[in-house]
Image: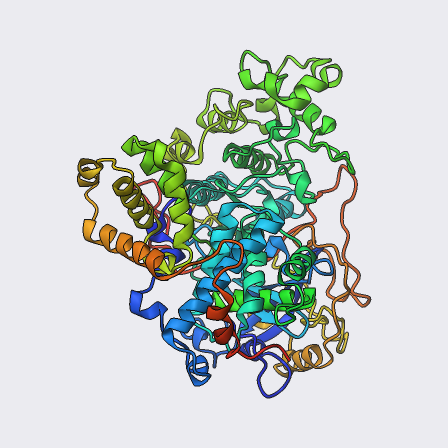
Amino acid sequence: MGDGRAGASNRPAWLQQYDLIGKIGEGTYGLVFLARLKPTHPQAAGRRGSPIAIKKFKQSKEGDGVSPTAIREIMLLREINHENVVKLVNVHINHADMSLYLAFDYAEHDLYEVIRHHREKLNLAINQYTVKSLLWQLLNGLNYLHSNWIIHRDLKPSNILVMGEGEEHGIIKIADFGLARIYQAPLKPLSDNGVVVTIWYRAPELLLGAKHYTSAVDMWAVGCIFAELLTLKPLFQGVEAKATPNPFQLDQLDKIFKVLGHPTVEKWPTLANLPCWQNDQQHIQGHKYENTGLHTIVHLPQKGPAFDLLSRMLEYDPRKRITAAQALEHEYFRMDPLPGRNALIPSQPGEKIVAYPIRPVDTSTDFEGTTSLQPTQLPSGNAPPGGQPVPRQLPRQMQQQAMGGMPRMPAGANMGAFGAAPQAGMVGLNPGNIPMQRGAGGQAHPHQLRRKADQQGMGMQNPGYPQQKRRF
Amino acid sequence: MAANFWASSHSKQQLDPEEVDVVPAADRERGITTEEFRLVKIHMSSHIWRLAQQVKVRQRVIATAITYFRRVYTRKSMTEYDPRLVAPACLYLASKVEESTVQARLLVFYIKKMCGPDDKYRFEIKDILEMEMKLLEALDYYLVVYHPYRPLLHLLQNAGITDLTQFAWGLVNDTYKMDLILIYPPYMIALACIYIASVLKDKDTTSWFEELRVDMNIVKNISMEILDFYETYKVDPQRGLSDEKISPVMNKLPTKA
């Protein structure tokens, strides 16, 4: 992978293999950039100018070296290879400022933006074929991870990327492995890691203080995402009780109970052993919701396969919850419309193609995250990637600036999380390089997360899609 | 990966026995022989072990650290990568990978305590952090390592000789004084340790081994290597190799500027 040694100049040689386009995301862990492999680069053969998302990790707290999040992500992604999981293309190190860069194949979309586009711009449900194909591919990637003893632990729409136009158009890539674990490693509670994860997709056993993770936590998240694809709204929008070392999240549990009814020890025997269930009888066991209203929220017939699959994913007892492998075999995926490889093509001949927005790119930021250069060189939010209004010299200029002065990253920057804040809605320029904040309240989307991408060959190792009729 | 050794980067990086004892050109120029190259690796493996006892990490972390250490020197020279620094940096990186992070300042503290006035071993936090990044590069960012411990327990149970666990476990620990982990699949190393343990403790495992249908030649070869090692080298658990043996070799290596 990348050779971090400096060449004749004091900028690392690896940097010269990319044309930097701009910044596409930002988070506590660092920044994400969009770049292209220069056509002269050997790896660019056959993939001329393919877009690459480069995730830059800031140095973590003084004296802590490479962030454990980055280590985890490198360790796992270097071993795995699946069509529905992001592909780590390269790792680079800049020894001068001790920063680490992960290069992924770029994905133009993610489920957060796809859902948002339907909700806010189109005001139209996502078509059934697309929902089913997205869900099938998500399960397919997850089944691969789980059968390799990897739990993702932070599945949510913004971590599920969808490839833009090209060879892999409409293919899902599960991303952000900063919290993922191999089962055999001891799984510490999230709070022990000092990591804050959005609670909307968190399984009830975790909210009630379960000490051990199982792959079932990922399946709960898939259930939440399935419902969100159907309704365009997060299923359980709890308000997070911050600053508590306790995993117990009363409001989130209340939101779940309201929809699914109260869990009972009869249906979920190990419930009785969960610390927060035992300790907080008054609040959680206090008032009871009897009627379950899931089907009215997702507008699905209660007897239909889609509802059956969804309710098996949202099964309270993690031991009874459907597994990814079982879900792939579910009747829902065997009936029309059948899922396909490109989830974003129209489901019926003649149906209108949905033009999903592309990621806004802030071309005024260099690899150092320092705002620089002519602020007039802004991207128009929706220019096609090929037509980025960036003159050829610009990236090089940025690189020189970036690597020449080499301002150090501020020490003591918090490296807790791993995703970048979405920059959607931001129009290019961010003069003060102020981290973009979005949606702090309970109503707004709490994922301050995202970005980065991936892909990989044509996924020949895949078991293939589950039906006779393919939609390639 | 985690479920399948054969699909792992560890498996793909396995080397032939001849490949692990190649002294890098820069070290050869300093007069380091194959035997001396091996001595440094033995001594520094023991150094990692002792340091790990101080900071109290699990066996697995130590094993991963030593594997990194040995893997680095199939690619880099000791002249360029000072083993006195690479050793603690490997432990540091391994502790992160195995989810039981040890702080760099603790390592620095215990190295001082262990090595006393010898300032060839003295490093700052900054040195360890810089080396951590160089290690990531040298390891080509492949960090997942498999070990014989898990298969060992499983196999002992299967053979119905769990009373040999402690003895066989100790043998597995000692295999990290060699480069076996870079050459053989971990379960074969585990089998070799079971083989030695059962022979020395008079347990008849012949029919059990037969039923396993593994290549007994490989199991026996590994066993012979382990026994040879015990005959050839005396490694003091508290001090590593004796001073007379290791000092002249370490003195051939450059020290930090």
Q: Residue at x 54, y 60 (%)?
A: B90
Q: Position of residue B31 (x, y in %)?
A: 43, 83
Question: Which is nearer the eye, A315 or B170?
Answer: B170
Q: Residue at x 21, y 40 (%)?
A: B209
Q: Position of residue B27 (x, y in %)?
A: 45, 80
Side (left or right) of A140 relative to B102:
left
Residue A176 in view of the camera: no
Residue B182 in view of the camera: yes
Question: Which is nearer the eye, A240 or B70?
Answer: B70
Q: In this view, which residue lies farthest toward the front?
A: B244
When asked about the image quadrant of residue B176, the answer is bottom left
Q: In this view, which residue lies farthest toward the right?
A: A432
How many marks are shown on the rendered structure? 0
Q: Residue at x 44, y 36 (%)?
A: A324
Question: Which is nearer the eye, B257 or A396?
Answer: B257
Q: In this view, which residue lies farthest toward the bottom?
A: A8
Q: Residue at x 54, y 52 (%)?
A: B97
- What is the image's colouring? rainbow
Question: Which is nearer the eye, A125 or A406?
Answer: A406
**In the image, is residue A285 above or below residue B130?**
above
Q: Position of residue B235 (x, y in %)?
A: 45, 58
**In the image, is residue B204 above or below residue A6?**
above
**In the image, is residue A272 above or below residue B185?**
above
Side (left or right) of A358 relative to B160:
right
Q: Position of residue A364 (x, y in %)?
A: 72, 72
Side (left or right) of A60 relative to A68:
right
